[in-house]
Image (cartoon, rainbow, N blue to C red):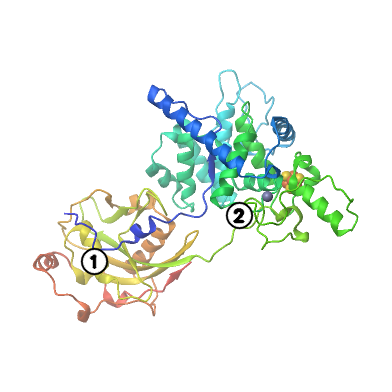
Amino acid sequence: MKKPRTAVRTCRRKQASSQEGREKQVLSSSPVKPSTPDGEELRLSQGLARRQKEVVLRASVSPYHLFRDTAEVTVFRENLLSWYDREKRDLPWRRRVSRQGAGTEGWHQPPSTLTPCPGLHWQAEGEVDPDRRAYAVWVSEVMLQQTQVATVIDYYTRWMQKWPTLQDLASASLEEVNQLWAGLGYYSRGRWLQEGAQKATGVVDGNVVRVLCRVRAIGADPGSTFVSQQLWSLAQQLVDPARPGDFNQAAMELGATVCTPQHPRCSQCPVQSMCRAHQRVEREQLLASQSLPSSPDVEECAPSTGQCQLCAPPTEPWNQTLGVANFPRKASRRPPREECSAICVLEQLRALGGARILLVQRPKSGLLAGLWEFPSVTAEPSGRCPREALLQELQSWAGPLPATHLQHLGQVVHTFSHIKLTYQVYGLALEGQTPVTITPPGTRWLTREEFHTAAVSTAMKKVFRVYEGQRLGTCKRSKTSQVSTPSTRRKLSPGQQVLDSFFRPHIPTDASSLKSMAQ
Ligand code: SF4
Ligand code: ZN
């Protein structure tokens, strides 16, 4: 029954090529070992390719932005890890939970008001598995990146109950991850965690990017492919093979507590002696005070030639007032792209087992990958009414439908990380014993209860509220609403006329004007 969809330019198809904001990078500090000879070959060839890439990268980079030798790398690791062992924050996900009668040696007993982190489990010998601890911190850090602690706690707890170890997460499906992540926003984070679990254990997050950019005076855009590869390579070089989890946590901790975006505390930094940003500040201060020694013993990159791909471009000169915060360069923030979509809640009110609504799954990559949403089509902001295209889209999923029941209900504006999407919300409610029983691949007919716990975005919940408000008659009128009138009715095909005899419009047209819901 599902028709070829070439005639309809769907919203999903267009968005599939988008990326949801800048992605974090996953580093492989302890790659998973394949068990088969083929896997071994693949692993070796990947390792070779990576080393070749690193050699090429290094060949094109000034030594100023690199670590000189293994001795310097060793000092960096030692300084960072001993600082971390001394200063690490007492966070719930790092806390060792006391075993009955085993005391609290080493880690703190959690206050009774705190729920022990479900991801931490005692081993037979009474030690917390450091890999599990690293995993728990990783999950929490990723969740906390765009979301407040109060919101994260519930999600974090449920996540760790469902996937207490990295291995558990690695075997989870994207569908499950999206379902648990629903409502937390920035969905690429959940996907990224799952993909990371499948191939790696180390992390470079925003904090680590900042630290590395400062330590090696990288002033070029950290979002560019070249700089991103260079940061990846630096982190690979630095990560301590003996304590990769702790090293990653230490680097993130340094960025979160000392090398902060606005007010870094360089005097308390364990790697200050190796920090090129700090050296640059001292040199600039000397220059400013006109007391620069005649032959300064200061390492520099090719100064202001515009040749170095890791230095700031000449158009972005040093800002004295920023100090070390000249690094990293701020990613240029473009205003979100504006897009429009016509979307429809298609509901069978008398379906078997109760009312059911149609959802279709988004592509596995791109914006909101793998999430479920109501059928939609892309609409031009000032173009013709997308009603016909939307009806075609609906029929491509559900077969012939009564066109006159398709009602415009209002609009929802939702801003994703880089797209401001305006949904023109339609509703089509089918009453009576419906013959629509088909469920083509990639579709689901969900009950309301299932919808509320499904892997759907916040935007879909807003769209559904418009539809619900319409049905309950609680929404106010909107100037922007368009109401279907007899003059707009299409000539129905014979099949549709038959269907019309089954279904009566459920949504009264006199209540179909809704106030725009804008976020
Ligand atoms: Fe950051 Fe300052 Fe430490 Fe450099 S010395 S890494 S800028 S805190
Ligand atoms: Zn440079």
Instruction: Report if the beta carbon of the residue with label 1 is closer than 8 angstroms to ligand 2.
Output: no
The answer to whether 275 appears left or right of 385 in the picture is right
Q: Indicate which label's residue lies in the foreground, 1 or 2.
A: 2
Precedes in sequence: disc 1 or disc 2:
2
Residue 369 x %, y %: 39, 50
Q: Is residue 36 visible?
A: no
The answer to whether 176 appears left or right of 91 in the picture is left
Q: Secondary structure at mark 1?
A: helix
Question: Residue at 45% across / 47% down in the picture?
Answer: 181
| Marker disc for residue 221 | 2
Image height of 219 relative to 215, above or below = below
Image height of 96 relative to 355, above or below = above
Instruction: Report if the beta carbon of the residue with label 2 is closer than 8 angstroms to ligand 2.
Output: no
- The residue where tag 1 is placed is 391
Image height of 317 relative to 244, above or below = below
Query: Mark 1 belongs to which amino acid?
Result: Leu
278 or 57: nearer the viewer: 57
Q: Residue furthest top?
A: 125
Q: CA distance from mark 1 to mark 2?
A: 45 Å
Question: Residue at 64% across / 50% down in the picture?
Answer: 310
Query: Mark 2 belongs to which amino acid?
Result: Asp
Q: Secondary structure at mark 2?
A: loop
Question: Residue at 74% across / 34% down in the picture?
Answer: 79
